[in-house]
Amino acid sequence: MPNETAVSPEREVGDFGKAFPGVWKLVEAKRIEGAKARLAWPSWCYLPYEHAHEIMSNFVPNLPPEIARTISSPVAQILEARRILAHNLCLYSAWRHTKGIYRFDPSVYAELIDTPLDSELPCELLLRLPEWAVTMETPGLLLGETLKSHVMLTVTLRDSEPIVILTCNLFRPLVLPLARQSIAAALAHAFAAGELRRVFEPFVRRALALAIYLCCEEPDMSSGTDRRAMGMKTTRRGTKFFPPGSVQMWDVGMRIGAELRTARDEWERENAQHDSVEGHQRARPRPHFRKAHERRVWYGSGDNARAVYRWFPSTLVNTKKSADLIETIRPVKANDDDT
């Protein structure tokens, strides 16, 4: 089982900037231009795809040989390269302004990547990332037959619809359109239409499960849940963003992970004690995570009663403090036109 080449997210983004000199200044100019013209793209989107594609038209990119040989026309090769690199630019330009890397507690990580996405998790959930783009450490996660140490992920606009872009040292990023009601439906459509190859399905599902947890109202993280204002400064030309000098590490799930391990140790001790007594009663169920799920919640009463669906992430069950660990999702504003 091959390991991936050890290229850090910071190195990957830095290499992109070196390959296309001046690209970050073009991105900043485009964002300032959009703010002055009051172009309406939502605050969760750092740079829409169409603007990224316009920026990449200033360069003459080359395709890797394994991709180029599948396209006969040189002009078509350039167009395809710009399309791919525009997606990369959306992701890299967003991530370099906060450089957040999320490290999950091992117990929580194992539970999250096993969380099924079968339920009707709404696509709008992914609009609540704590940063414009995130990098998540993914020990042991396979893409095909290759181990991947991390995943970079962002949500942006393309043709006025949200899309997820994710990569892990890939020239061609994985793109998931979210023009469906649920994440499960968006995935099913992408695989059926060939927008995502089936071999990527386990990897994409697990990466999304990690990202969904970061979108919770109060995830178990080492700091606040919205870091997009980091490096933001007001200048005479408007608001500008200055990337941090180094990556920002964020621990995720440490409290819950420690409680889960403590609860499991307690369960093991209880079972050992029961097993030593003849005719013992069955021990209580093992502490575990209740899988992420949607639940219908009723508001009001009588004629004013109404039902809404809310999503609840994985929750510890059969622990003394499990009631304190249920997390909720804030509703997403329908019209958020800040740039």
Image: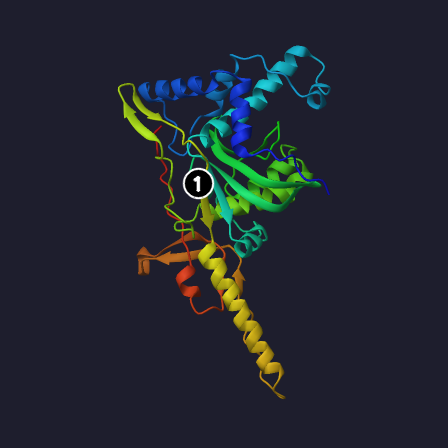
Q: Position of residue 311 (x, y in %)?
A: 45, 52
Element marked by disc 1: loop
Residue found at the very far left of the displayed protein: 236
Say which amino acid is labelled 1. Answer: Leu
Q: Compared with residue 286, is residue 256 higher up or lower down, i.e. above or below? A: above
Q: Residue at x 56, y 39 (%)?
A: 151
Q: Quadrant of the C terminus?
A: top left
- Give the image quarter of residue 80: top right
Q: Position of residue 101 (x, y in %)?
A: 48, 40
Q: Which residue is mark 1?
A: 129
Closer to the camera in the image, 223 or 206: 223
Q: Quadrant of the N terminus?
A: top right
- Give the image quarter of residue 37: top left
Q: Position of residue 252 (x, y in %)?
A: 47, 50
Apparent side of residue 278 relative to residue 125 in the rendered image (left or right): right
Q: Residue at x 53, y 57 (%)?
A: 291
- Give the image quarter of residue 15: top right
